[in-house]
Image: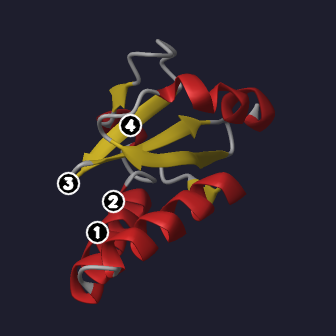
Amino acid sequence: MDLEVKWSPEATEDLESIAEYIARDSEFYARAIVSEILSVSQNIREFPLIGRVVPEIGDERTRERFIYSYRLVYQIEPERILIVAVIHGKRLLENFSERFEDST
């Protein structure tokens, strides 16, 4: 497929918050985790269907990949892949529903 990968402003803020939180204990691990999240997000462009369907949403176009304890949530659109959220794996997407309505 090889679609363009774009990050929503909210997902970018999520990633920055994660980096800041982890950096309180270890800047090394903060960089490593952010680097891995960015790497996985770029790999999605070739195989967007490799992620699982997000259970809370149940739409084939909304998928996620797990990186360590974080969920990288993305939507497959006709021209691109939009990274919608990066959240801790224990959190549900209930509070993030407006992100999906705005991105379509």
Q: CA distance from mark 2 to mark 1?
A: 6 Å
The residue beneath circle 1 is 36
Q: Is residue 91 above or below residue 82?
A: above
Q: Report the amino acid beneath label 3.
A: Tyr
The residue beneath circle 3 is 68
Q: Is residue 37 above or below residue 81?
A: below
Q: What crowding class fits label 3: few (fewer than 14 Cα within 10 Å), some (14-19), or many (20 or more)?
A: few
Is 60 on the left or on the right of 4, as rendered? left
Q: Are marks 1 and 3 in contact (CB under 8 Å)?
A: yes
Q: CA distance from mark 2 to mark 3?
A: 11 Å
Q: What crowding class fits label 1: few (fewer than 14 Cα within 10 Å), some (14-19), or many (20 or more)?
A: few
Q: How far from the left and from the top, in percent, is residue 94?
A: 54, 22
Q: Are marks 2 and 1 in contact (CB under 8 Å)?
A: yes
Closest to the camera, between mark 4 and mark 3, is 3
The residue beneath circle 4 is 64
First-in-chain label (1 vs 3): 1
